[in-house]
Amino acid sequence: MENDAMVYLDGPQIYTCGQCRTHLTSHDDIISKSFHGRHGRAYLFDQCVNIVTGPPEDRILITGLHSVCDINCKRCGTLVGWTYAKAYEPSQKYKEGKFIIEKINLHLEE
């Protein structure tokens, strides 16, 4: 049975779902702000909570072929980004297990 309890993050700057304000990640978990998603700027995060991960699928992205899983907000179901299951290019392996969330889907609580 899936755990449906929500995780609440501590810290001065928490990124939440832009739709329902569910905690997703912390400012401290940002690896890079230099990514692009389907709808513009996106951030690469080390960790993410309160998400549902979809099945892996291969996609050709700007940096090459990757196996990615869409991630949705656990509370409202909004598609917020994706996680990297596998990077086929050796130079992109650092992305594996990391999360892309599009800025348009984030709200910063300070």
Image (tube, rainbow, N blue to C red):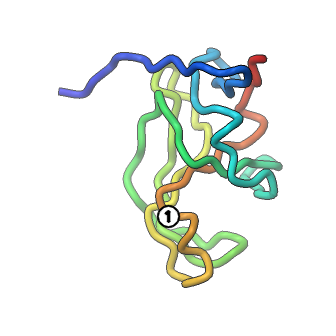
Q: What residue type is labelled 1?
A: Glu
Q: Which residue is drawn at 44% across and 62% down?
A: 85
Q: Residue at x 78, y 17 (%)?
A: 110
**40 or 31, which lies in front?**
31
Residue 63 pos. (x, y %): 69, 75
Q: Which residue is drawn at 64% across and 32% down?
A: 26
**102 or 25, which lies in front?**
25
Residue 56 pos. (x, y %): 40, 59
Is 70 on the left or on the right of 41, as rendered?
Answer: left
Say how many tags the image has. 1
Classify residue 4 by image quadrant: top left
Q: Residue at x 65, y 24 (%)?
A: 16
Residue 64 pos. (x, y %): 63, 78
Classify residue 1 by image quadrant: top left
Is 68 on the left or on the right of 21, as rendered?
Answer: left
Disc 1 element: loop
Residue 7 pos. (x, y %): 45, 20
Q: Residue furthest left?
A: 1
Identify whether 74 is placed above or below 46. above
Classify residue 104 by image quadrant: top right
Reading the image, the residue beneath label 1 is 96
Identify whether 46 is placed above or below 77. below
Q: Residues within 10 Å of mark 1 (few under 14, many from 20)?
A: some
